[in-house]
Amino acid sequence: MLRYMPTLLALYAHPDDEAFSGGVLAHYAKLGVDVHLICATRGESGKITDPELEHITDLGAQREQELRDSCAALGIHEPIFLGYHDSGRFERTQTENGSAFMHQDIFEVEAKLRPYIESLNPDVLLTFDPHGGYGHIDHLVIHRAVTALFYSSGTPKRLFYNVLPVSFAERMAQTGINQNLDPKVYGVSDATIAVKLDVSAVIEQKQASMKAHRSQMGANSRFAKMPPEYLEQMQESMKTEYFAVGGTRTPIPSFPLKGFFDGLGFDFD
């Protein structure tokens, strides 16, 4: 067994993106893994869904603090912000804003991330899948940059993508929360799932993390407007998280894996 505890580095585009993998982040932090989070933007172009926060003029500052509170709830290190501008979605898309993350050169983003690989020396990287979760342009940018970083840096042992099985995506479609996305496009096949993790033991931390994002989880959010029967279904679904392998420099002892560090010499997977 290795004598040191490993490091996990999650890389996402916006505050609240970590909700996709909040369970696994809390799970490994609880086991003693050194868990870090890099966030490309401050979420400036998000939509305020909490009526009590509609007076806010600096949404970026609000969401930055929300992410700090979320990380505290998960028991991980404070977030690292890259300082890019949120590209937004739908009517809020920052098409004319040259500083928006969607307009950044992938190779420059990769170069900006490289010093964190050198300083944190992560064993495992985690980011969005090739569909960006649900196609958000900023999610696709961070996916491409992190994937390139994994292959160019040569040091992290594994790269994982958080994913949704097609069956899960189909259930989301029933709730209406998937914004009419085709489950067969944005979901992944069951055969692709490398890690299926039961996070029920840390579900309270995951829920607290989500609640920390007040501006995005308010009374006018999609979650709040979901019918009770679908909300109950979603809450149950949150107890399981799914991941695919994006790259590895070590042998895979079996497939699917028991966890991110299975076969790396640690005794907790």
Image (cartoon, grey):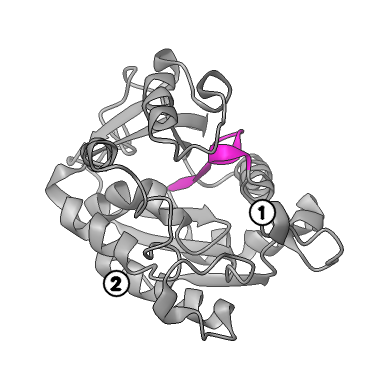
Magenta region: 124-135
Mark 2 is surrounded, within 10 Å at the Cα level, by few (under 14), some (14 to 19) or many (20 or more) other residues, namely some
Q: Which mark is residue 54?
A: none
Element type where label 1 sits in the image: loop
Residue drawn where x is 23% and y is 50% of the image: 27
Give the quadrant of the N terminus: top left
- Give amino acid for label 1: Arg
Residue drawn where x is 63% and y is 39% of the image: 135
**Does 61 appear above or below 86?**
below
Q: Which mark is residue 72?
A: 2
**Does any portion of residue 4 appear in the rendered image?**
no
Left or right of 12 in this view: 50: left
Residue drawn where x is 56% and y is 65% of the image: 47
Position in image of residue 156 (x %, y %):
50, 46
How far apart are the two marked residues, 1 and 2, measured between alpha carbons?
28 Å
Q: Please check the rendered image and state whether residue 201 is part of the magenta-colored stretch, yes or no.
A: no
Task: Return the residue at label 1.
Answer: 89
Q: Nearer the viewer, residue 118 or 201?
A: 201
Count of numbered circles in the view: 2
